Amino acid sequence: MFRNLRISIFIYYFLTVSAFLGTLHYFLAVVEVENIFLLAIVMICFSILGGVMISKLAVDPLQEHVTNLQNLSKETLHELNLPISTIITNANMIKKNMQSEKDLKRLSRIEIACNMLQERYNELDYMIKKQSLNEIKEIFFVDELVKERVEFLKHIYPHMEFQLELYSTQITSDRTGLAKVIDNIIDNAVKYSPNSNKCEIKLNDYTLHIQDYGCGMDEVELIQIFDNYYQSNDTMRGFGIGLSMVKRFCDSQGIQLNFKSKLGLGTTVLLKFKDD
């Protein structure tokens, strides 16, 4: 698709420039127009027309391609909702009549997997809405959101001990986007704490503190953490784009993002929310 588009734009641009130069030569050498001002107006109009046509030729196929992708995402999202809901509903019904502890553990794994699929569903739904809307704002309690995310992450990191000290804090922001930020920060806290199983999360004075006791970072690493694809440890999983996404979200929402870290002692991430 894009190869043909490049060729089409090149051909149209070549023909447009050739026509422009040919028309200019015609008016100057053949017709010998003396009114330069009138000639300039004609050539400007010709240039604008050519520019509009080239931009239309370049943008329309891309716009159609993006629209098709958006429609495909919406249709896929709609089709995913039914099987996820069906699995969750039937799993709950089966659980009521199940007595075997072994079978209950297996069913619990199914429920956890369904919850993870539901999270991916919510993220896809959020991304589609984010493209359609300029800004998403909701009034919610950060402490309730943190508890919700920790409960979900406990299933993924059962070895971690999350110590919570949360005060009721209400803000106006993008709830789903902030949930993704919290998940990302906690994921990093676990990932870079191979020899520790403790993560402390505190919320007071409109500031969220997420502290780990992992490998920590020196001053040089702290400067680089927001760079795309940067990872302080190349052996860790992931692509190193999480914190750059976190920073972009915080900047867009007016949330102050700060890191405190010492090599070998751990890292504390602070999110300072606006006092509404």
Image: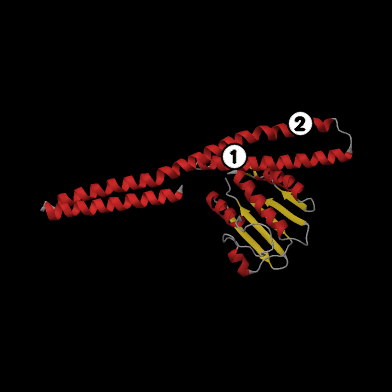
Q: How is the image coloured?
A: secondary structure
Instruction: Tell me the SS state at disc 1.
Output: helix
Q: Quadrant of the C terminus?
A: top right
Residue at position x 72%, y 59% in the image? 212
Q: Which residue is found at the position 57% from the left and 43% from the top?
A: 127
Q: Which mark is residue 108?
A: none
Say if mark 2 contacts mark 1, CB within 8 Å: no
Q: Number of numbered discs present?
A: 2
In screen coordinates, is 241 left or right of 68? right
Q: In the image, residue 228 lies at what x, y percent?
A: 57, 59
> What amino acid is found at the position of numbered circle 2 in the picture?
Asn
Asked whether 69 or 228 is in front, the reply is: 69
Residue 90 badge: 2
Relative to 65, residue 19 above or below: below
- Residue assigned mark 1: 125
Q: Nearer the viewer, residue 212 or 194?
A: 194
**Residue located 19% across and 49% down the image:** 41
Residue 150: x and y in percent read 72, 47
Give me the C-alpha separation between circle 2 and circle 1: 24 Å
Dot 2 alpha-carbon crowd within 10 angstroms: few under 14, some 14 to 19, many 20 or more: few
Looking at the rendering, which quadrant does residue 148 occupy?
Answer: top right
Nearer to me, 15 or 242: 15
263 relative position to 247: left or right: right
Amino acid type of disc 1?
A: Asp
For marks 2 and 1, the one nearer the N-term is 2
Note whether residue 130 is visible: yes
SS at mark 2?
helix
262 or 107, which lies in front?
A: 107
Residue 9 vertical placement versus 227 (above, below): above
Q: Is residue 18 left or right of residue 8?
A: left
For label 1, count other residues whose C-alpha is less than 10 Å away and answer few (under 14), some (14-19) or many (20+).
Answer: some
